[in-house]
Amino acid sequence: MQVRVQNVRKEFDLFPALHDVSLDVISGELIALLGPSGSGKTTLLRLIAGLERPTSGRIFFGDEDASEKSVQERNIGFVFQHYALFRHMTILENVSFGLKVRPRSRRPPANEIRRRALELLDLVQLSGLEKRYPNQLSGGQRQRVALARALAIEPKVLLLDEPFGALDAQVRRELRKWLREIHDRTGHTTVFVTHDQEEALELADRLCVMSQGRIEQVGTPDSVYDTPTSPFVFGFIGESSELAVNVDRSDIWLGDRAIGISGAEDVGPARLFFRPHDIELVEDDAALAGVVASSRRVGGTRRVELELGGGGARVEIDLPFDHPAGERSRIAFRPKRWQLFPG
Ligand code: ATP
């Protein structure tokens, strides 16, 4: 099911939580809403669910205007950060609940409900635990039950709000992979809220990066990482350094030093962004140069903080972990890939 959010604005007591947001969620994709705290991710998710009404704008499910429809009419599967399982019901009863409470005309027969619930427990790899109660499961297992319960009603759209937020890092990583596999098997249109960029980059078909109630960029993880369209996205997704530079005759200058990269179109003050691993060490003077202020091992490389000459700005670059540079060593480098934004 395709979901179209069209020019949606949402105010809470005149405070605009979302400004004119438009987003097309493609049928069958897993899209992650990613952004810092307060950027409007949960508000957008709740609007899609029908738990909130837009102040203005519309939301379409397929060709149908769903803006005025209730949560039930929208047929949404929802999983929250805090497992809202029914504590007094067994796992099987929890998963069956959504089907059991349907009006009789749309309710499958009892044996069919049971068959479907057991099948879903098998899908989330919890076969054999159907007679347990939620407090007899681990946090990760409870979230898997919550997902099975959300899938049981055969939702048109699955909405997940930081579903792994309360779990430890190792379990999170496992569930992430598992969620991707389930999604590939079931093909539900899924909107996933997270503030964890690693989770979003690994899991999603597309990212929707949000900041201050606006969508900054929508694209595949690769396109957002490789070609951020704003300073915010460059700084928010992945590691990056930023320098205040000047562009003159297409050369880029840091203070009075040409840094050996060119090709910029506009002239004047600009913000130069690059990633720590997108650099090359050089010997000549037309480069960025500085002394090592600190360094630490990051996996197979060494992340070095350099204090640049003239102004003392600091940037981070990656060196091979066995590079001999010690504290206060002088290093010159040039970004191999970089982006400029107007200053
Ligand atoms: P987080 O990652 O912290 O959950 P978020 O990106 O999901 O943040 P939202 O919960 O959508 O952000 O909130 C966006 C803005 O709207 C925030 O400034 C928040 O304080 C405000 N807001 C959200 N819900 C309400 C509400 N019911 N009443 C008033 N303001 C609200």
Image (tube, rainbow, N blue to C red):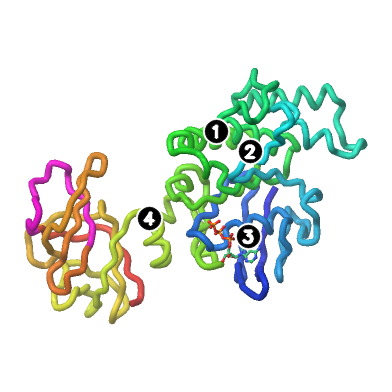
Kindly identify the residue that appears in the image at 88 percent across and 37 percent down.
Answer: 106
Please tell me which of labels 4 and 3 falls first in the chain.
3
Seen from the viewer's position, the closer of residues 169 and 183 is 169
Q: Residues within 10 Å of mark 4 (few under 14, many from 20)?
A: some
Please tell me which of labels 4 and 1 falls first in the chain.
1
Residue contact at pointers 1 and 2, CB within 8 angstroms: no
Please tell me which of labels 3 and 1 falls first in the chain.
3
Q: Secondary structure at mark 3?
A: helix
Residue contact at pointers 2 and 4, CB within 8 angstroms: no
The amino acid type found where label 1 is placed reads Gly
Counting from the top left corner in percent of width and height, residue 294 is at 17, 54
Q: Which residue is mark 1?
A: 140
User: Position of 232 compared to 116: left or right?
Assistant: left
Which label sits in the foreground, 4 or 3? Answer: 3
The amino acid type found where label 3 is placed reads Thr
Q: Which residue is mark 3?
A: 43
The amino acid type found where label 2 is placed reads Gly
Please tell me which of labels 1 and 2 falls first in the chain.
1
Q: Residues within 10 Å of mark 2 (few under 14, many from 20)?
A: some
Kindly identify the residue that appears in the image at 57 percent across and 43 percent down.
Answer: 163
Please tell me which of labels 3 and 2 falls first in the chain.
3
Cα distance between the residues tagged 3 and 1:
25 Å
Q: Which residue is mark 4?
A: 226
Q: Which residue is mark 2?
A: 187
Q: Secondary structure at mark 4?
A: helix
Residue contact at pointers 4 and 3, CB within 8 angstroms: no
The amino acid type found where label 4 is placed reads Asp
Q: Is residue 295 above or below residue 308?
A: above
| Quarter of the rendered structure image containing ligand 1 | bottom right
* Name of the residue lying farthest toward the top: 128
